[in-house]
Amino acid sequence: GVDILKSERSKSKISVDKLSDFLFTKEVIERQDRILKILQAEKVFDKSQNYFDGRVERFKTSLARAKKLRQLQVKHNWNRDEYMVANELISEPTPYGLHASMYLTTLEGQGTPEQHKLFLEPAQNYKAIGCYAQTELGHGSNVRGLETTATWNPEDKTFILHSPHLTASKWWIGSLGRTANHAVVMAQLIIAGKTYGPHPFVCQIRDMKTHEPLEGVHVGDIGPKFGYNTMDNGFLLLNKVKVPHINMLARFSRVDPETNKYVKPSSPSLIYGTLTWVRSTIVLQSGGVLARGVAIATRYAAVRRQFQDRDAPADANSENQVLNYTMVQYRLLPLLAATFALHFTGKAMMGLYQENQKNMNSEAAKTSNASRGPGPEETHSGSDLLADLHATSCGLKALGSTTAAEGLEVCRRACGGHGYSSFGGIGTWYADYLPTTTWEGDNYMLTQQVARYLLKSARAVLKGNAPNNDTTKIFTTFLQKQDMGAAHDVLGSDSDLVAAFAWRTSFLTFEALKHRDVEKNSWNSLLVDFWRLSTAHSQYLVVKNFYDALQSGSLRYELDPGTIDILHKLFRLYALNTLQQEASEFYSSAAVTVRQIQLARTKTVMKLLEEIRPHALSLVDAWNFPDWQLDSSLGRKDGKVYEDMFYRASELNPLNGLTVDPYPDSDILIKKDETAKFKSKL
Amino acid sequence: GVDILKSERSKSKISVDKLSDFLFTKEVIERQDRILKILQAEKVFDKSQNYFDGRVERFKTSLARAKKLRQLQVKHNWNRDEYMVANELISEPTPYGLHASMYLTTLEGQGTPEQHKLFLEPAQNYKAIGCYAQTELGHGSNVRGLETTATWNPEDKTFILHSPHLTASKWWIGSLGRTANHAVVMAQLIIAGKTYGPHPFVCQIRDMKTHEPLEGVHVGDIGPKFGYNTMDNGFLLLNKVKVPHINMLARFSRVDPETNKYVKPSSPSLIYGTLTWVRSTIVLQSGGVLARGVAIATRYAAVRRQFQDRDAPADANSENQVLNYTMVQYRLLPLLAATFALHFTGKAMMGLYQENQKNMNSEAAKTSNASRGPGPEETHSGSDLLADLHATSCGLKALGSTTAAEGLEVCRRACGGHGYSSFGGIGTWYADYLPTTTWEGDNYMLTQQVARYLLKSARAVLKGNAPNNDTTKIFTTFLQKQDMGAAHDVLGSDSDLVAAFAWRTSFLTFEALKHRDVEKNSWNSLLVDFWRLSTAHSQYLVVKNFYDALQSGSLRYELDPGTIDILHKLFRLYALNTLQQEASEFYSSAAVTVRQIQLARTKTVMKLLEEIRPHALSLVDAWNFPDWQLDSSLGRKDGKVYEDMFYRASELNPLNGLTVDPYPDSDILIKKDETAKFKSKL
Ligand SMILES: Cc1cc2nc3c(=O)[nH]c(=O)nc-3n(C[C@H](O)[C@H](O)[C@H](O)COP(=O)(O)OP(=O)(O)OC[C@H]3O[C@@H](n4cnc5c(N)ncnc54)[C@H](O)[C@@H]3O)c2cc1C
Ligand SMILES: Cc1cc2nc3c(=O)[nH]c(=O)nc-3n(C[C@H](O)[C@H](O)[C@H](O)COP(=O)(O)OP(=O)(O)OC[C@H]3O[C@@H](n4cnc5c(N)ncnc54)[C@H](O)[C@@H]3O)c2cc1C
């Protein structure tokens, strides 16, 4: 393995370090190196028994890690980003996961200054450990349908939190099962018999000393899962649990304790903002998530030799690297291209988001009293851009996480038999990532929001009162050229390639609009069309963002022409491969001709695979994953695949401590049990 | 849940029992009921802790189950089929898995009568437990590249089995890790310095009494996997281990101990036969494998309600069953159609295989001496049919197992959040099935064999010396009509629909032939084309077999017209949905027009979903899975989804025995550990 990878690396002229710097910046890379050293020095982060332990042990280890991580954060004074880097290097969900993310964020975003003092501060100092309890056994996507109630009691100015049915049990709540002593509980607010929809309430659930559940609280872990087993996702049934008035998070809406009246939020668009931010983060991460699988599979496929080439001269001696087979390239290299495409798209999205935040804040500053935080009324301006951003984040969250999750499985399977070994390192990573396709908006559900936005924009364009943004621009272009035809030179011109994707989105949008507004078809009957539309639009956005990234000035400044040329090829591979896979919509919209698709399919894509092949290893190296992070025998940077597989199987594997009696008619099952000597010690 | 499923069932007029009988026969269904009762009465088969145990515990339980199963087989005098039924009801791989399949089969098929007496008989009586050791750390697909050697020693008439490198270590060998005391080892036969390729050798590896490895044998379990963890897949390094002459399985080829000469097999086609049989079994099973996921997801989607219909009247009260959303139907119902398509295809394949065996045997009987088993020379006749059968089995194995594996994941994801719970029952089943896409021929690799066969057939058709079979028939039709065009009425006529699939296969075959024979492209450069071709051809075979099954006389005799009508709709859904997904090849081959595809996509398929929807529950009921087999909260036949989820989480889950100290600066990790009281006792 070692020699092969060396010679592979020497064959490409790409300057890996410069490309890494360009992708992540020098600063980020140095930060990662620094934190990696700190983690590796701690015994509790040793990964060598990860793949062997059962769930209870894995959870214990994970809690120990979560604690140590927090201690290190305090000791080294890590900020949020540094803490996240450490988390990513450890690469497993920990029982503090939802405390550190959703619990803190919700208190921060939805609490008043008084509530910050009361709830947020102890939480930030880990004096209280919390979680975010929204989903119930019976309701997830439909938040308005939640059954948990919070009934206002004017007598003693409290809320009574209650689970009226079994299906009202909170379910799936990360960190709730064994770890948290607090929860933000989303519950239907009821005042004087009237329901005002779901609102957030802080609720203590376990004793701060004994950690036993409080009275009226039935709480526990929901059991083993397909992945995510180091996290204690929990259930929670509340039996008329009283919380004081201050426990309803009141930044946006509240109950007036004097009048017992509901005070409603003036604009919901800031909450919108948080959702958009969370989804943008998922988009940004999806490239890196997928890149881990691509790095492992590409390195292994370079080390793995199997069969001689069928057309090789008869005296050829050694077997072919499987990465040389076009069938393997066709599976892996478009995914390699997708990692870059998603990375640049995520970056661009984050940029847009921040710019928009800035705009909103500066507008807010103009009108607001400096002595208080921005209130809901200030978030209204810029909401056109926010709507576009929100739809974009929905569509790209769905496309990005689906691409990453399904791509990881393609990578795993490309490794043949060894891909099934836990030492391969892809399977566990895949299973832990998979829920991302379902949470923060189920990927299929999200497509309805994208479609709704596109239909709305299309109607505005037709009416002539559309805001000026990219979406309305491509619709306008489409309407102008619709009858002339398009004639996109997708094989010759990159900008035409982008335009062909824009054309397809526009075509599908106006088709859907016709079905809905003219033919008056039911919403439900159009869901599949909407899903196709959202996918098409999101693919357009990825193609466009990748294209834009390649036009940037810093690119030309930081990278040499050879590397830039390969990035262009990756762009074309991503775009043309997507085009040929989704051919049907491209020809029926007349964005391209049947002949062009056939050429893309059988010639251009195959040519690009051949041209990118020599640089595959350097391109995955540029993602800069430390071996410690990948924790994979197949993906080792030095190529020592087989040695590492053998070592782990024969030296670390507790099952080998078991000597059995193999005969069916014997009463004895185990003759000798020495499994204990393999167990890791905390 | 209970009421919903009752009312669902009452809405469909399909006679579920009759359909079950038609699919499986009454006899098979009764057999299953009988065996199920026996298994349920044994404590060791209790499944309630399956999802909680770690690997070591799961393996122990699984070994105990394997033993009990064998005891029951002896007690009830079960034949092979009955044993298999029990295995499927238990639904997890056991440590006897490879003994009961590959070890026995190989001894049987490749041993001489003397070897049967010596090795097969004790193995059949479980006095010796074996495995089939072919794959090595460095070689799997390329069997000719195996590195283990078996060197003939003329001095003492022995073979010396040896692993010359680390990569020669046997790897992935089922039942080898902890259980087997024998192995069939595939090793390169070397006589007088010359290598004769891989041959099978019986090798004892552990002491029959102590079960400790013998001298020169380094053996163990290869570690945890993505699925298949109740099996002890093992590694094996042999250090110059001597075995006597009789240990080389000698039915087909052998070393003459007098002359020290190699005696080669006269025809390899019987081995061919076993491979074909194994793959046909996989095809037959794929429908049922997928049906489990479809049954679970369909039942859950009928129980699960989420959101009100957007176009529902404002006063509508209850939420919609998610099975009513077209987006959910579009994901599940084509898979439901695929379960039937694969089932009928598998049946037809098995029928062809058996017919062919009969032909070969009767030809063999004519020429052979009755006092001995059929020798290799008798297997030559009928080899044309066998070649067709072999290619068919390769293609359908790849398509069937890919469809089942990927379909299961679609089903799991269709269950939203709860699909991730192990109690859902799809995840574990999926992970255990997944290796089927890689073993018995990696699904991508197999497509090369299919393409090779199709190219060969096409050349024969062009030359006019083709055998008469279905493949050559569709090629001939294509060549005749090629210039007139096809005009298949795919939306109006079922036989035209089949013909359109045949047309596409033929078109792709002659395209590939041109690339290879005229343009002289390298084999490697055509692998992606070959994969597409094989997929297309296999889809044609499934569509054709489904169609043929619907023409059968017994169908009309056993089923009422209403049920037959629904089966026809399932046929059309499978075929038209495949057609629209693979649109590109259908229009570029001019098998259909762009307009037809657009109609299929946006109208016909959607209409079929609507028509099949009311019968979905009855159709999955017809698969006749006992709840005990599915072991799924979501897929319970009675619809008690939430009660069962809650019961398992709160009553059976050992993690809930752990009370932690949640604070990062506390030295204590666990305050109280009561996990033991949840543990199952063997
Ligand atoms: C590992 C994990 C961790 C989680 N952590 C948390 C947490 O910390 N806190 C928390 O509150 N929640 C958490 N969740 C819950 C998660 O947010 C929900 O599971 C998710 O929102 C999906 O909702 P659901 O399960 O109700 O799916 P459902 O809405 O029931 O969806 C079921 C199926 O129906 C389809 N469907 C539903 N409605 C429609 C419609 N109108 N049109 C078309 N199709 C439809 C969906 O696409 C899906 O296929 C977690 C989930 C997982 C798996
Ligand atoms: C759970 C499990 C149980 C098993 N049990 C047994 C057992 O009991 N006994 C036993 O002997 N074996 C067993 N195996 C091994 C199994 O048969 C092999 O893993 C399988 O044959 C694949 O071979 P490989 O791993 O060498 O893949 P490789 O051949 O190394 O394939 C790696 C990748 O390269 C591609 N590739 C390779 N060659 C080519 C080519 N010429 N053209 C194009 N692409 C190519 C493949 O498609 C794949 O993506 C088991 C495997 C698993 C996962």
Image (tube, coloured by chain):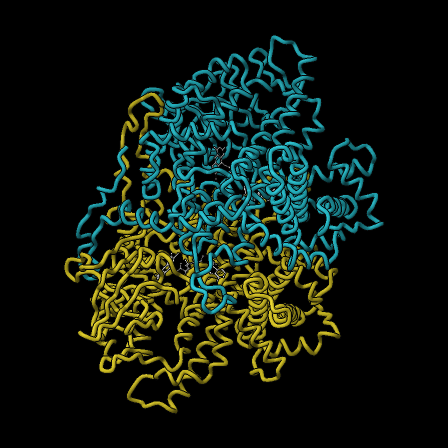
Chain colours: A cyan, B yellow
Q: Identify whether A617 is placed above or below B92.
A: above
What residue is rendered at 58% in x and 30% in y?
A275
Choose between A227 and B252: the one closer to the eye.
Answer: B252
Residue A122 placement: quadrant: top left
Residue B14 placement: quadrant: bottom right
Residue A67 image offset from top left, x and y in percent:
36, 26
Quadrant of the frame with the C terminus of chain A: top left
What residue is rendered at 28% in x and 59% in y?
B176
Residue B99 image offset from top left, x and y in percent:
29, 64
Single out the residue that lies furthest toward the left.
B209
Residue A316 image offset from top left, x and y in percent:
45, 65
Residue B172 placement: quadrant: bottom left
Choose between A478 and B513: the one closer to the eye.
Answer: B513
Residue A654 image offset from top left, x and y in percent:
26, 46
Choose between B402 and A517: the one closer to the eye.
Answer: B402
- Number of numbered discs on residues: 0
Q: Identify whether B641 is placed above or below B124.
A: above
Is B426 placed left or right of B616 in the picture? left
Is A267 placed left or right of A28 in the picture? right
Residue B318 seen anywhere in this rendered image of the structure? no
Single out the residue that lies furthest toward the top.
A371
Is B48 placed left or right of B127 in the picture? right
Choose between A175 and A63: the one closer to the eye.
Answer: A63
What residue is rendered at 23% in x and 70% in y?
B159
Q: Identify whether B617 is placed above or below A121.
A: below
Residue A498 seen anywhere in this rendered image of the structure? yes
